[in-house]
Amino acid sequence: MTLQQLHYVITIAEVGSMNKAAEVLYISQPSLTSAVRELENELGISIFHRSGRGVSLTNEGSEFLIYARQLYNQYEIINEKYGKSKNFKKKFGVSTQHYSFAVKAFVELVKSFDTSQYEFAIRETKTKDIIQDVGNLRSEIGIMYLSSFNRAAINKLLRTYNLEFHHIIDCRAYVYLWSGHPLAKCESINFEQLQNYPCLSFEQGDGESYYFAEEILSTNEYQRTIKACDRATMLNLMIGLNGYTLCSGIICKELNGDDYVAVPFDCPNDDESSVMEIGYIMKKNSSLTPIAQQYIDEINKYLNNL
């Protein structure tokens, strides 16, 4: 097994096609296929399903890719630090659920560095993808929440990727809606008041689970629901359809403007399932790099000034 073969497999998995991967890697398609076959024979597994529509990872291939990315990422780090050219950009990536405070902290972080010397990435994405990004070292940290409902399922997945969760802040549930919504001026809002309005939630992909929902109290039976993939669309649906979502109540007006409000959610019997523990995930038994620690410090600074 060689680093070159690992690079081939990672590239094929990313583009989903042998032909496209061969173009990206600047080698012939037969040579690429031969290299992957040799690796599969050596490992005794099939890494890819092959069809006329392209390639996809087998179950064994998905597991192998986790380790391949970790190993190849470490190689790149060593090569960047000690390679002959040393003409490289330092990298920092974070994957996050759709939190404006996470974006605000990222903005403040990037502003303090010379971007010609660094490569930054922020990925607002699905919950499971956040865990995979950090597990595969695509991002150094991930920002997400736990609750009494999802904690056991999420922690099980974190253990699979050798990750651990670190607490930042606890938040009660709020109803997030636009300032012109009929309920926007209420002191608190309950489910009965919301039944005539569509509940908005972020789509979690194929086989999505209640446990991966970004919105608290996802198991409630909502009469009207609409799913979206990005924060901008979510905000547009709030205005256009009087939609709402349940969130932490932490709104960055500098980024989102004054058109949206968060009203305390009136949860019956002070239900603990309405509490969100927001935190970050990282590799277990590892330390944050200085730049990652600065990012977490920026988040805490913002939250402490609310």
Image: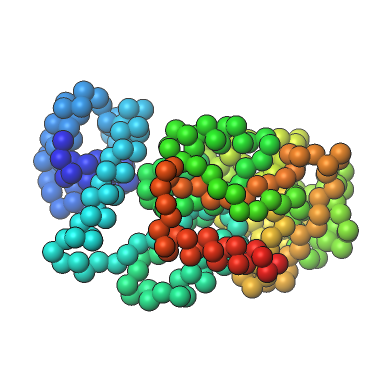
- Relative depth, front residue between 6 and 161: 161
Rendered-image quadrant of the N terminus: top left
- The picture places residue 301, in percent across and down from the top left corner, at 60, 67
Residue pictured at 68% horizontal, 47% vertical:
276
Q: Is residue 21 above or below residue 121?
A: above
Q: Is residue 138 left or right of residue 306?
A: left
Name the colour scheme.
Answer: rainbow
Q: Is residue 158 above or below residue 193?
A: above
Residue pictured at 64% horizontal, 56% vertical:
234
Residue pictured at 29% horizontal, 49% vertical:
73
Q: Is residue 182 left or right of residue 83?
A: right
Rendered-image quadrant of the C terminus: bottom right
Residue pictured at 48% horizontal, 65% vertical:
294
- The picture places residue 170, in percent across and down from the top left corner, at 69, 51
Residue 138: tell me if it is visible. yes
The image quarter in which residue 264 lies: bottom right
Q: Is residue 23 above or below residue 147?
A: below
The image quarter in which residue 127 lies: top right
**Number of numbered discs present?**
0
- The picture places residue 90, in percent across and down from the top left corner, at 32, 65
Q: Is residue 272 left or right of residue 85?
A: right
- The picture places residue 229, in percent across and down from the top left corner, at 56, 51
Residue 208: tell me if it is visible. no
